[in-house]
Image (cartoon, rainbow, N blue to C red):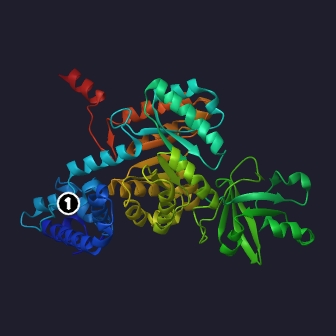
Amino acid sequence: MTITRKTSLQELTQEKVSHQLTDIVKEMQEAQREFASQLSELHDNFKLSGANLIDYLVLRSNEIREAQEYLHHVGLSSLTNSESHTQFQLSNVLNWLNPNSIKTNNASCNFEVASKLRMIHAEQLLGVNPIQERPHIMVTFSAELMQDRMLVEEMLNEGMSVARINCAHDNPEVWLNMISVLKKAIAKTGRNCKVYMDLGGPKIRIKAISAKRKNECQMLPVWEGRELILTRLKDAESDVKKRRRRGADMLIVEPSELLSMVNVGEHIFFDDGKFEAKVTRVESELVYVKIVRISTKKPYLKPEKGMNLPDSDLAIEPLTEEDKRNIPFICQHADLVGYSFVNSPGDVEMLRAEIAKYASQHKPSIILKIERLSAVQNLPALLMNGMKDEALGVMIARGDLAVEIGFERLSEIQEEILWICEAAHVPVIWATQVLETLNKTGYATRSEITDAAMGVRAECVMLNKGKYIVKTIKTLDDILTRQLGHVNKKRYIMRPLGIARSFIQRGS
Protein backbone atom coordinates (compact mmCIF):
# COMPACT_ATOMS: atom_id res chain seq x y z
CA MET A 1 0.00 0.00 0.00
CA THR A 2 1.50 3.35 -1.06
CA ILE A 3 0.99 6.49 0.99
CA THR A 4 1.20 9.65 -1.12
CA ARG A 5 2.42 13.08 -0.06
CA LYS A 6 -1.12 14.41 -0.43
CA THR A 7 -2.26 12.37 2.54
CA SER A 8 -2.66 14.55 5.64
CA LEU A 9 -1.21 13.46 8.97
CA GLN A 10 -4.71 13.28 10.43
CA GLU A 11 -5.76 10.79 7.74
CA LEU A 12 -2.88 8.46 8.52
CA THR A 13 -3.58 5.57 10.81
CA GLN A 14 -1.39 3.00 12.46
CA GLU A 15 -2.90 0.41 10.14
CA LYS A 16 -2.08 2.34 6.94
CA VAL A 17 1.53 2.94 7.96
CA SER A 18 1.88 -0.67 9.06
CA HIS A 19 0.61 -1.86 5.68
CA GLN A 20 3.06 0.36 3.80
CA LEU A 21 6.06 -0.76 5.86
CA THR A 22 5.01 -4.40 5.51
CA ASP A 23 4.94 -4.00 1.74
CA ILE A 24 8.42 -2.46 1.78
CA VAL A 25 9.86 -5.33 3.84
CA LYS A 26 8.35 -7.77 1.32
CA GLU A 27 9.96 -5.73 -1.49
CA MET A 28 13.31 -5.98 0.28
CA GLN A 29 13.05 -9.72 0.63
CA GLU A 30 12.06 -10.07 -3.03
CA ALA A 31 14.99 -7.86 -4.09
CA GLN A 32 17.36 -10.05 -2.07
CA ARG A 33 16.22 -13.01 -4.14
CA GLU A 34 16.53 -11.10 -7.42
CA PHE A 35 20.08 -9.96 -6.63
CA ALA A 36 21.16 -13.26 -5.04
CA SER A 37 23.57 -14.03 -7.88
CA GLN A 38 25.34 -10.65 -7.62
CA LEU A 39 25.45 -10.86 -3.83
CA SER A 40 27.08 -14.28 -4.00
CA GLU A 41 30.00 -12.77 -5.98
CA LEU A 42 30.88 -10.28 -3.23
CA HIS A 43 33.87 -10.82 -0.97
CA ASP A 44 32.93 -12.42 2.34
CA ASN A 45 33.73 -9.08 4.03
CA PHE A 46 30.92 -7.42 2.08
CA LYS A 47 28.18 -10.04 1.71
CA LEU A 48 26.03 -8.64 4.55
CA SER A 49 26.90 -5.11 3.46
CA GLY A 50 25.75 -5.79 -0.09
CA ALA A 51 22.47 -7.19 1.17
CA ASN A 52 21.94 -4.12 3.35
CA LEU A 53 22.70 -1.85 0.38
CA ILE A 54 19.92 -3.57 -1.59
CA ASP A 55 17.54 -3.08 1.36
CA TYR A 56 18.39 0.60 1.59
CA LEU A 57 17.92 1.15 -2.14
CA VAL A 58 14.48 -0.47 -1.92
CA LEU A 59 13.55 1.80 0.99
CA ARG A 60 14.71 4.92 -0.86
CA SER A 61 12.79 3.86 -3.97
CA ASN A 62 9.55 4.36 -2.00
CA GLU A 63 7.73 7.54 -1.00
CA ILE A 64 7.71 7.32 2.81
CA ARG A 65 7.73 10.96 3.94
CA GLU A 66 4.14 10.92 5.23
CA ALA A 67 4.79 7.65 7.05
CA GLN A 68 7.92 9.21 8.58
CA GLU A 69 5.90 12.14 9.87
CA TYR A 70 3.42 9.74 11.47
CA LEU A 71 6.21 7.69 13.10
CA HIS A 72 7.81 10.84 14.46
CA HIS A 73 4.40 12.03 15.69
CA VAL A 74 3.83 8.85 17.74
CA GLY A 75 7.40 8.80 19.12
CA LEU A 76 8.92 5.98 17.07
CA SER A 77 12.03 5.93 14.87
CA SER A 78 11.28 7.75 11.63
CA LEU A 79 13.89 5.61 9.81
CA THR A 80 16.18 8.58 9.14
CA ASN A 81 19.18 6.81 10.68
CA SER A 82 18.63 3.35 9.26
CA GLU A 83 21.26 3.41 6.50
CA SER A 84 23.62 0.87 8.03
CA HIS A 85 20.94 -1.65 9.17
CA THR A 86 17.89 -0.88 7.08
CA GLN A 87 15.69 -3.97 7.12
CA PHE A 88 16.40 -4.62 10.79
CA GLN A 89 15.38 -1.07 11.76
CA LEU A 90 12.31 -1.10 9.57
CA SER A 91 11.16 -4.45 10.93
CA ASN A 92 11.59 -3.33 14.54
CA VAL A 93 9.48 -0.24 13.90
CA LEU A 94 6.91 -2.41 12.18
CA ASN A 95 6.79 -4.79 15.14
CA TRP A 96 6.05 -1.87 17.44
CA LEU A 97 3.16 -0.88 15.20
CA ASN A 98 1.93 -4.41 14.64
CA PRO A 99 3.35 -7.30 16.72
CA ASN A 100 1.89 -9.77 14.22
CA SER A 101 3.66 -8.20 11.25
CA ILE A 102 6.02 -9.93 8.83
CA LYS A 103 9.27 -11.04 10.44
CA THR A 104 12.64 -9.93 9.15
CA ASN A 105 15.33 -12.31 8.03
CA ASN A 106 17.39 -13.35 11.07
CA ALA A 107 20.55 -12.93 9.00
CA SER A 108 19.82 -9.27 8.28
CA CYS A 109 22.25 -6.68 9.50
CA ASN A 110 21.45 -5.24 12.95
CA PHE A 111 22.96 -2.10 14.47
CA GLU A 112 25.76 -3.88 16.33
CA VAL A 113 26.80 -5.91 13.29
CA ALA A 114 26.67 -2.83 11.06
CA SER A 115 28.84 -0.81 13.46
CA LYS A 116 31.39 -3.63 13.56
CA LEU A 117 31.44 -3.97 9.77
CA ARG A 118 31.95 -0.24 9.30
CA MET A 119 34.89 -0.30 11.69
CA ILE A 120 36.45 -3.40 10.11
CA HIS A 121 36.14 -2.03 6.58
CA ALA A 122 37.63 1.33 7.60
CA GLU A 123 40.57 -0.28 9.38
CA GLN A 124 41.28 -2.66 6.51
CA LEU A 125 41.34 0.25 4.09
CA LEU A 126 42.91 3.08 6.07
CA GLY A 127 44.49 1.47 9.12
CA VAL A 128 43.67 1.91 12.79
CA ASN A 129 42.40 5.40 13.60
CA PRO A 130 45.11 7.54 15.18
CA ILE A 131 42.41 8.89 17.48
CA GLN A 132 39.49 6.59 18.23
CA GLU A 133 36.63 7.15 15.77
CA ARG A 134 38.12 10.42 14.49
CA PRO A 135 38.36 10.32 10.68
CA HIS A 136 41.80 9.81 9.18
CA ILE A 137 43.56 12.85 7.74
CA MET A 138 45.04 12.51 4.26
CA VAL A 139 47.62 15.03 3.00
CA THR A 140 48.76 15.56 -0.59
CA PHE A 141 52.53 15.36 -0.98
CA SER A 142 54.70 17.40 -3.34
CA ALA A 143 58.29 17.26 -4.53
CA GLU A 144 59.06 20.44 -2.56
CA LEU A 145 57.66 18.97 0.63
CA MET A 146 60.08 16.07 0.42
CA GLN A 147 63.04 18.39 0.98
CA ASP A 148 62.09 18.62 4.66
CA ARG A 149 61.83 15.32 6.54
CA MET A 150 61.29 17.11 9.85
CA LEU A 151 58.19 18.73 8.36
CA VAL A 152 56.86 15.30 7.41
CA GLU A 153 57.55 14.09 10.95
CA GLU A 154 55.62 17.06 12.30
CA MET A 155 52.72 16.29 9.98
CA LEU A 156 52.64 12.71 11.26
CA ASN A 157 52.75 13.83 14.88
CA GLU A 158 49.88 16.27 14.33
CA GLY A 159 47.61 13.58 12.89
CA MET A 160 48.31 12.78 9.24
CA SER A 161 47.71 9.08 8.67
CA VAL A 162 47.41 8.84 4.86
CA ALA A 163 49.87 10.36 2.38
CA ARG A 164 48.57 11.13 -1.11
CA ILE A 165 50.74 11.12 -4.23
CA ASN A 166 49.12 12.47 -7.39
CA CYS A 167 50.43 10.50 -10.39
CA ALA A 168 49.29 13.30 -12.71
CA HIS A 169 52.43 15.12 -11.58
CA ASP A 170 56.14 14.22 -11.38
CA ASN A 171 57.46 10.72 -12.16
CA PRO A 172 58.32 7.41 -10.47
CA GLU A 173 61.73 8.67 -9.38
CA VAL A 174 60.17 11.60 -7.53
CA TRP A 175 57.39 9.41 -6.11
CA LEU A 176 59.96 6.94 -4.77
CA ASN A 177 61.77 9.81 -3.07
CA MET A 178 58.50 10.94 -1.47
CA ILE A 179 57.81 7.44 -0.17
CA SER A 180 61.39 7.07 1.09
CA VAL A 181 61.18 10.31 3.08
CA LEU A 182 57.78 9.26 4.44
CA LYS A 183 59.07 5.83 5.51
CA LYS A 184 62.00 7.43 7.37
CA ALA A 185 59.63 9.84 9.12
CA ILE A 186 57.33 6.94 10.07
CA ALA A 187 60.29 5.06 11.55
CA LYS A 188 61.37 8.14 13.50
CA THR A 189 57.93 9.01 14.90
CA GLY A 190 56.47 5.52 15.29
CA ARG A 191 53.27 6.73 13.60
CA ASN A 192 51.36 4.70 11.03
CA CYS A 193 50.65 6.16 7.59
CA LYS A 194 49.17 4.59 4.46
CA VAL A 195 50.37 5.51 0.96
CA TYR A 196 47.61 6.53 -1.46
CA MET A 197 48.45 7.02 -5.14
CA ASP A 198 46.02 8.74 -7.50
CA LEU A 199 45.99 7.56 -11.11
CA GLY A 200 46.19 10.55 -13.43
CA GLY A 201 43.34 9.35 -15.64
CA PRO A 202 42.46 10.93 -19.00
CA LYS A 203 43.62 14.54 -19.25
CA ILE A 204 40.61 16.46 -20.55
CA ARG A 205 42.10 19.89 -20.96
CA ILE A 206 43.26 22.75 -23.13
CA LYS A 207 46.54 21.32 -24.41
CA ALA A 208 47.60 24.53 -26.14
CA ILE A 209 46.23 27.80 -27.51
CA SER A 210 46.68 28.85 -31.13
CA ALA A 211 45.96 32.57 -31.01
CA LYS A 212 46.01 35.10 -33.86
CA ARG A 213 48.38 37.16 -31.72
CA LYS A 214 51.40 35.15 -30.69
CA ASN A 215 51.67 36.92 -27.34
CA GLU A 216 48.22 35.55 -26.39
CA CYS A 217 49.08 31.85 -26.85
CA GLN A 218 49.93 31.49 -23.13
CA MET A 219 47.23 33.80 -21.81
CA LEU A 220 44.20 34.33 -24.02
CA PRO A 221 41.87 37.16 -22.98
CA VAL A 222 38.17 36.23 -23.14
CA TRP A 223 34.89 37.95 -22.41
CA GLU A 224 31.24 37.00 -22.33
CA GLY A 225 29.93 36.57 -25.87
CA ARG A 226 33.34 35.80 -27.36
CA GLU A 227 33.48 32.91 -29.85
CA LEU A 228 36.29 30.36 -29.80
CA ILE A 229 37.04 27.24 -31.83
CA LEU A 230 38.02 23.91 -30.29
CA THR A 231 40.20 21.73 -32.49
CA ARG A 232 42.88 19.04 -32.56
CA LEU A 233 46.59 19.82 -32.71
CA LYS A 234 46.94 18.44 -36.24
CA ASP A 235 44.05 20.56 -37.54
CA ALA A 236 45.33 23.69 -35.81
CA GLU A 237 48.74 23.32 -37.47
CA SER A 238 47.33 22.78 -40.95
CA ASP A 239 44.46 25.26 -40.82
CA VAL A 240 46.06 28.57 -39.88
CA LYS A 241 44.87 30.42 -42.99
CA LYS A 242 41.28 29.16 -42.63
CA ARG A 243 41.31 30.12 -38.98
CA ARG A 244 42.38 33.66 -39.78
CA ARG A 245 39.53 33.99 -42.23
CA ARG A 246 37.14 32.89 -39.49
CA GLY A 247 38.54 35.55 -37.19
CA ALA A 248 38.57 33.28 -34.14
CA ASP A 249 41.25 31.95 -31.85
CA MET A 250 41.65 28.20 -31.39
CA LEU A 251 41.83 26.06 -28.29
CA ILE A 252 43.67 22.81 -28.99
CA VAL A 253 42.06 20.19 -26.73
CA GLU A 254 42.88 16.65 -25.67
CA PRO A 255 41.99 13.90 -26.00
CA SER A 256 41.29 14.66 -29.65
CA GLU A 257 38.31 12.26 -29.84
CA LEU A 258 36.52 14.62 -27.46
CA LEU A 259 35.44 16.76 -30.41
CA SER A 260 33.23 14.01 -31.84
CA MET A 261 31.37 13.62 -28.53
CA VAL A 262 29.85 17.09 -28.16
CA ASN A 263 26.65 18.48 -29.63
CA VAL A 264 25.13 21.90 -30.20
CA GLY A 265 23.58 23.36 -27.04
CA GLU A 266 25.83 21.50 -24.62
CA HIS A 267 27.92 23.32 -22.05
CA ILE A 268 31.68 23.18 -21.59
CA PHE A 269 33.46 24.50 -18.51
CA PHE A 270 37.11 25.54 -18.35
CA ASP A 271 39.51 25.92 -15.42
CA ASP A 272 37.44 24.39 -12.59
CA GLY A 273 34.25 26.08 -13.79
CA LYS A 274 35.60 29.64 -13.89
CA PHE A 275 34.59 29.90 -17.55
CA GLU A 276 31.34 28.55 -18.97
CA ALA A 277 30.85 28.15 -22.71
CA LYS A 278 28.03 26.86 -24.89
CA VAL A 279 28.47 24.87 -28.10
CA THR A 280 27.00 26.89 -30.98
CA ARG A 281 28.12 24.90 -34.01
CA VAL A 282 29.81 21.59 -34.78
CA GLU A 283 31.71 21.03 -38.03
CA SER A 284 34.11 18.30 -39.09
CA GLU A 285 36.78 18.25 -36.36
CA LEU A 286 35.84 21.79 -35.29
CA VAL A 287 33.61 22.80 -32.40
CA TYR A 288 32.48 26.42 -32.05
CA VAL A 289 31.72 27.69 -28.56
CA LYS A 290 30.60 31.00 -27.10
CA ILE A 291 31.66 32.16 -23.64
CA VAL A 292 28.46 32.73 -21.61
CA ARG A 293 29.82 33.23 -18.07
CA ILE A 294 33.11 34.24 -16.44
CA SER A 295 33.55 33.87 -12.68
CA THR A 296 37.03 35.25 -12.10
CA LYS A 297 38.66 38.66 -11.96
CA LYS A 298 41.39 37.37 -14.29
CA PRO A 299 39.54 36.53 -17.54
CA TYR A 300 42.31 34.64 -19.29
CA LEU A 301 42.33 31.08 -20.59
CA LYS A 302 45.65 29.25 -20.31
CA PRO A 303 47.13 26.00 -21.62
CA GLU A 304 47.00 22.93 -19.36
CA LYS A 305 43.74 24.05 -17.70
CA GLY A 306 41.08 21.37 -17.30
CA MET A 307 37.73 21.04 -19.05
CA ASN A 308 34.41 19.63 -17.86
CA LEU A 309 31.64 18.52 -20.23
CA PRO A 310 28.70 17.61 -17.98
CA ASP A 311 26.12 17.50 -20.80
CA SER A 312 28.15 15.32 -23.15
CA ASP A 313 28.15 11.54 -23.32
CA LEU A 314 31.89 10.95 -23.05
CA ALA A 315 33.04 7.50 -24.14
CA ILE A 316 36.59 7.83 -22.83
CA GLU A 317 38.27 4.99 -21.01
CA PRO A 318 39.29 6.06 -17.49
CA LEU A 319 42.44 3.92 -17.54
CA THR A 320 45.03 5.49 -19.85
CA GLU A 321 48.19 3.95 -21.25
CA GLU A 322 50.18 6.14 -18.88
CA ASP A 323 48.12 4.82 -15.96
CA LYS A 324 48.88 1.26 -17.05
CA ARG A 325 52.61 2.04 -17.13
CA ASN A 326 52.38 3.39 -13.57
CA ILE A 327 50.42 0.46 -12.10
CA PRO A 328 53.48 -1.80 -11.50
CA PHE A 329 55.04 0.96 -9.36
CA ILE A 330 51.74 1.52 -7.54
CA CYS A 331 51.34 -2.19 -6.83
CA GLN A 332 54.83 -2.28 -5.34
CA HIS A 333 54.63 0.83 -3.17
CA ALA A 334 51.02 1.90 -2.52
CA ASP A 335 48.35 0.73 -0.10
CA LEU A 336 45.53 2.50 -1.93
CA VAL A 337 44.98 3.48 -5.56
CA GLY A 338 42.60 6.29 -6.55
CA TYR A 339 40.59 5.68 -9.73
CA SER A 340 39.78 8.90 -11.57
CA PHE A 341 36.93 9.25 -14.08
CA VAL A 342 35.39 5.89 -13.13
CA ASN A 343 31.87 5.55 -14.52
CA SER A 344 30.80 1.94 -14.77
CA PRO A 345 31.36 -1.53 -13.28
CA GLY A 346 33.32 -2.40 -16.43
CA ASP A 347 35.80 0.34 -15.51
CA VAL A 348 36.35 -1.30 -12.12
CA GLU A 349 36.93 -4.67 -13.77
CA MET A 350 39.50 -3.08 -16.07
CA LEU A 351 41.59 -1.69 -13.19
CA ARG A 352 41.22 -4.89 -11.16
CA ALA A 353 42.58 -6.91 -14.10
CA GLU A 354 45.60 -4.59 -14.45
CA ILE A 355 46.37 -4.78 -10.74
CA ALA A 356 46.15 -8.58 -10.84
CA LYS A 357 48.97 -8.66 -13.42
CA TYR A 358 51.48 -7.12 -11.02
CA ALA A 359 50.21 -7.79 -7.49
CA SER A 360 50.07 -11.48 -6.70
CA GLN A 361 49.99 -11.01 -2.92
CA HIS A 362 49.73 -7.39 -1.80
CA LYS A 363 47.07 -5.59 -3.82
CA PRO A 364 46.42 -1.88 -3.36
CA SER A 365 42.78 -1.27 -2.46
CA ILE A 366 40.73 0.63 -5.03
CA ILE A 367 39.27 4.04 -4.17
CA LEU A 368 36.43 4.98 -6.51
CA LYS A 369 36.61 8.73 -7.18
CA ILE A 370 33.11 10.07 -7.73
CA GLU A 371 33.57 13.15 -9.88
CA ARG A 372 31.07 12.84 -12.75
CA LEU A 373 27.28 12.74 -12.82
CA SER A 374 27.40 9.32 -14.46
CA ALA A 375 29.44 7.99 -11.52
CA VAL A 376 26.81 9.32 -9.10
CA GLN A 377 24.01 7.70 -11.09
CA ASN A 378 25.92 4.40 -11.27
CA LEU A 379 27.14 4.47 -7.66
CA PRO A 380 25.18 1.40 -6.46
CA ALA A 381 26.47 -0.66 -9.41
CA LEU A 382 30.02 0.60 -8.83
CA LEU A 383 29.82 -0.40 -5.18
CA MET A 384 28.41 -3.83 -5.94
CA ASN A 385 31.33 -4.48 -8.25
CA GLY A 386 33.93 -2.94 -5.95
CA MET A 387 32.74 -5.08 -3.05
CA LYS A 388 34.10 -8.15 -4.82
CA ASP A 389 37.43 -7.07 -3.30
CA GLU A 390 38.49 -7.42 0.31
CA ALA A 391 38.60 -3.65 0.84
CA LEU A 392 37.04 -0.71 -1.01
CA GLY A 393 36.70 3.04 -0.58
CA VAL A 394 34.93 5.99 -2.20
CA MET A 395 36.26 9.52 -2.60
CA ILE A 396 33.82 12.39 -3.02
CA ALA A 397 35.95 14.47 -5.40
CA ARG A 398 33.97 17.63 -4.83
CA GLY A 399 35.98 19.87 -7.17
CA ASP A 400 35.19 18.23 -10.51
CA LEU A 401 31.88 16.93 -9.18
CA ALA A 402 30.64 20.44 -8.39
CA VAL A 403 31.42 21.61 -11.93
CA GLU A 404 29.84 18.52 -13.46
CA ILE A 405 26.55 18.61 -11.55
CA GLY A 406 26.35 22.35 -10.75
CA PHE A 407 27.56 23.94 -7.54
CA GLU A 408 24.01 24.39 -6.25
CA ARG A 409 23.50 20.60 -6.28
CA LEU A 410 26.75 19.65 -4.56
CA SER A 411 25.36 19.72 -1.02
CA GLU A 412 22.48 17.42 -2.00
CA ILE A 413 24.59 14.98 -4.01
CA GLN A 414 27.37 14.64 -1.44
CA GLU A 415 24.70 13.74 1.12
CA GLU A 416 23.31 11.05 -1.17
CA ILE A 417 26.78 9.58 -1.69
CA LEU A 418 27.35 9.47 2.07
CA TRP A 419 24.00 7.72 2.65
CA ILE A 420 24.54 5.07 -0.01
CA CYS A 421 28.12 4.36 1.07
CA GLU A 422 27.01 4.04 4.70
CA ALA A 423 24.38 1.52 3.60
CA ALA A 424 27.17 -0.49 1.93
CA HIS A 425 29.51 0.01 4.92
CA VAL A 426 32.07 1.43 2.48
CA PRO A 427 34.50 4.05 3.87
CA VAL A 428 34.32 7.55 2.37
CA ILE A 429 37.06 10.13 1.78
CA TRP A 430 35.86 13.74 1.97
CA ALA A 431 38.03 15.66 -0.52
CA THR A 432 38.77 18.94 -2.30
CA GLN A 433 39.56 22.36 -0.85
CA VAL A 434 39.09 21.44 2.81
CA LEU A 435 40.47 24.39 4.85
CA GLU A 436 42.05 25.64 1.62
CA THR A 437 42.34 29.29 2.66
CA LEU A 438 43.89 28.36 6.00
CA ASN A 439 46.35 26.08 4.21
CA LYS A 440 47.44 28.82 1.81
CA THR A 441 47.29 31.96 3.95
CA GLY A 442 47.32 30.86 7.58
CA TYR A 443 43.81 32.25 8.20
CA ALA A 444 40.59 30.26 7.86
CA THR A 445 37.22 31.52 6.64
CA ARG A 446 34.12 30.85 8.71
CA SER A 447 32.47 28.88 5.91
CA GLU A 448 35.39 26.51 5.44
CA ILE A 449 35.46 25.72 9.17
CA THR A 450 31.81 24.65 8.88
CA ASP A 451 32.60 22.66 5.74
CA ALA A 452 35.49 20.88 7.49
CA ALA A 453 33.19 19.94 10.37
CA MET A 454 30.93 18.15 7.85
CA GLY A 455 33.85 15.84 7.11
CA VAL A 456 33.34 14.07 10.45
CA ARG A 457 30.73 11.91 8.71
CA ALA A 458 33.39 10.42 6.44
CA GLU A 459 36.15 7.99 7.38
CA CYS A 460 38.90 10.21 5.99
CA VAL A 461 39.30 13.91 5.15
CA MET A 462 41.77 15.04 2.49
CA LEU A 463 43.92 18.16 2.65
CA ASN A 464 45.86 19.59 -0.25
CA LYS A 465 49.47 20.74 -0.05
CA GLY A 466 49.99 24.24 1.34
CA LYS A 467 52.37 26.61 3.10
CA TYR A 468 50.58 26.19 6.44
CA ILE A 469 49.95 22.47 6.25
CA VAL A 470 50.99 21.66 9.84
CA LYS A 471 48.67 24.32 11.24
CA THR A 472 45.92 23.07 8.93
CA ILE A 473 46.31 19.45 10.08
CA LYS A 474 46.21 20.58 13.70
CA THR A 475 43.08 22.69 13.11
CA LEU A 476 41.31 19.89 11.24
CA ASP A 477 42.17 17.43 13.99
CA ASP A 478 40.65 19.79 16.56
CA ILE A 479 37.49 20.37 14.50
CA LEU A 480 36.90 16.67 13.85
CA THR A 481 37.61 15.64 17.44
CA ARG A 482 35.12 18.19 18.78
CA GLN A 483 32.46 17.11 16.29
CA LEU A 484 32.76 13.48 17.40
CA GLY A 485 30.76 14.32 20.51
CA HIS A 486 27.82 15.45 18.39
CA VAL A 487 27.75 13.35 15.21
CA ASN A 488 28.18 9.68 14.34
CA LYS A 489 28.01 9.47 10.54
CA LYS A 490 24.71 11.28 9.84
CA ARG A 491 23.23 10.38 13.24
CA TYR A 492 23.22 13.23 15.74
CA ILE A 493 24.09 12.16 19.26
CA MET A 494 23.44 14.02 22.50
CA ARG A 495 26.67 14.74 24.30
CA PRO A 496 25.96 16.62 27.57
CA LEU A 497 25.93 20.34 26.81
CA GLY A 498 27.82 22.69 29.11
CA ILE A 499 25.26 25.40 28.33
CA ALA A 500 22.44 23.16 29.58
CA ARG A 501 24.31 21.88 32.64
CA SER A 502 25.34 25.32 33.88
CA PHE A 503 21.80 26.71 33.56
CA ILE A 504 20.19 23.76 35.39
CA GLN A 505 22.80 23.83 38.13
CA ARG A 506 22.33 27.57 38.66
CA GLY A 507 18.57 27.07 38.89
CA SER A 508 18.88 24.38 41.55
Q: Quadrant of the C terminus?
A: top left
* Rendering quarter of residue 423: bottom left
Q: Relative to 125, say whether 342 is above or below.
A: below
Is 170 on the left-hand or right-hand side of 391? right
The amino acid pointed to by label 1 is Ser
Q: Residue furthest bottom?
A: 284
Q: Is residue 198 at all visible to an observer of this figure?
A: no
Residue drawn at x 47%, y 48% as measured from the top left: 336
| Residue 100: x %, y % from top left | 6, 66
Is 158 on the left-hand or right-hand side of 220? left
Is 44 on the left-hand or right-hand side of 320? left
Nearer the observer, 499 or 181 = 181
Q: Secondary structure at mark 1?
A: loop
Q: How many marks?
A: 1
Residue drawn at x 49%, y 57% as measured from the top left: 355
Residue drawn at x 38%, y 57% as measured from the top left: 389
Nearer the observer, 381 or 216 = 381
Q: Relative to 1, say whether 40 is above or below.
A: above
| Residue 61: x %, y % from top left | 33, 69
Disc 1 marks which residue? Answer: 108
Q: Residue furthest front?
A: 360
| Residue 401: x %, y % from top left | 54, 57
Residue drawn at x 66%, y 45% as measured from the top left: 171
